[in-house]
Image (tube, rainbow, N blue to C red):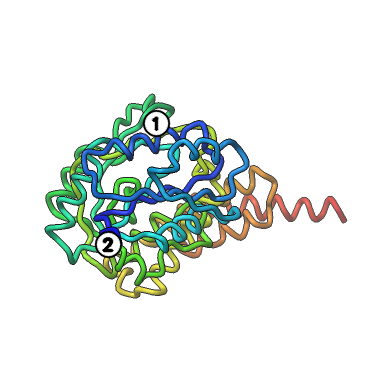
Amino acid sequence: MNQSPAISVVIATFNRAEYLAATIDSVLNQRFRDFELIVVDDGSTDKTRAVLQCYSARLKYLYQSNGGASSARNLGVRHARAPWIAFQDSDDLSLPNHLASLYDYARNHPACGMVFANGNYLSGAAQSRGKQTIIPLGKSRQLAQRGVRLVDLFEKSILRVQAALISKQAYDSLGGHDESLRICMDLDLGFRMLMNFPVAYLDQELFSYRIHAGNIGRNEELRLTENIRIIENLIRDYPEARKLIGKNLLSRRLAYRYYRLAKGRWRENHHEAASQAIKEAVSLRPWHLKYWAYRLQWDLSQRKGLFTRV
């Protein structure tokens, strides 16, 4: 029997044939060599299978009907032989020192549930706004110096699993990725990891994020509803999280998410759903005049609509 590798790299892909070869090459060109590569095709209908045939001897190929990235990642981990898991998105690039840097830390800290790092942008809108890295450089240095706190993940979604190495034992004990989530699964996993295991951070750039029209995170309605749900799950399942985050920050951020959700729904003429969302924002921050103003304005608008229909 072949000796188990140190790391299992799992790539979940769906209709990313145009980017997939570059992603796979970036993993295969790692300085660190003791890894296996598992690619899970999540029901692709493009030329994904043809791209993967060129690498048949260098990776394990798995196929499933389309179930989302979380489901595909979980399938990949079930077939993984290594004690450490590295996820890579099929449209991003793994930098040459990616696995070496993470594993060097992990092997010296075996109790660690997860160690993650920074990334940069390949190209696109974020770079044109002056952002060079996923986590701002000052924040990155601060995280490495003082450690990662729950509030760090809560204030801004800094975790990208493309820059993480995760203990398979820890991942399995938490049930892996939540397969009901399509966008915010990384933040959800990060919350649960921090509440149960030591989590570390390295001040290094280990992957490149590609911005393109197909990024699923651009679905604002889904992103906000999932974000709200995982925050509410966090404080339900881990009551101590409320104290770690702080009551004021918790209510302020949740209320703002409901407010953004309400505005988006109103623009899409989903008026009843918008009114319900702004009511949630008001209930969380009852003294915030802007939320009250929107609630009163929209309630009045709906009443006028009812009178007109009558």
Q: Earlier in the sequence, mark 2 or mark 1?
A: 2
Q: Is residue 117 left or right of residue 155?
A: left
Classify 10 Å Cα crowding around label 2: few (below 14), some (14-19), many (20 and above): some
Visible residue check, residue 156: no
Question: In which quarter of the view is residue 233 placed?
Answer: bottom left
Quadrant assignment for the N terminus? bottom left
Q: Residue furthest front?
A: 1
Q: Nearer the viewer, residue 291 or 208?
A: 208
Residue ID for mark 2: 83
Residue at (45, 42) in percent of width and height: 56
| Residue 224, percent from left and from top | 50, 52
Q: Nearer the viewer, mark 2 or mark 1?
A: 2
Q: Nearer the viewer, residue 230 or 85?
A: 85
Residue at (22, 56) in percent of width and height: 148
Q: Is residue 271 left or right of residue 107?
A: right
Q: Residue furthest top?
A: 128
Visible residue check, residue 50: yes
Q: Residue furthest right?
A: 310
Residue at (45, 54) in percent of width and height: 184
| Residue 299, percent from left and from top | 66, 55
Amino acid type, mark 2: Pro
The answer for how far apart the CA atoms under marks 2 and 1 are is 35 Å
Q: How many marks?
A: 2
| Residue 243, percent from left and from top | 28, 69
Amino acid type, mark 1: Ala
Quadrant assignment for the C terminus? bottom right
Question: In which quarter of the view is residue 195 placed?
Answer: bottom left
Residue ID for mark 1: 126
Residue at (72, 53) in percent of width and height: 302
Q: Secondary structure at mark 2?
A: loop
| Residue 74, percent from left and from top | 44, 60
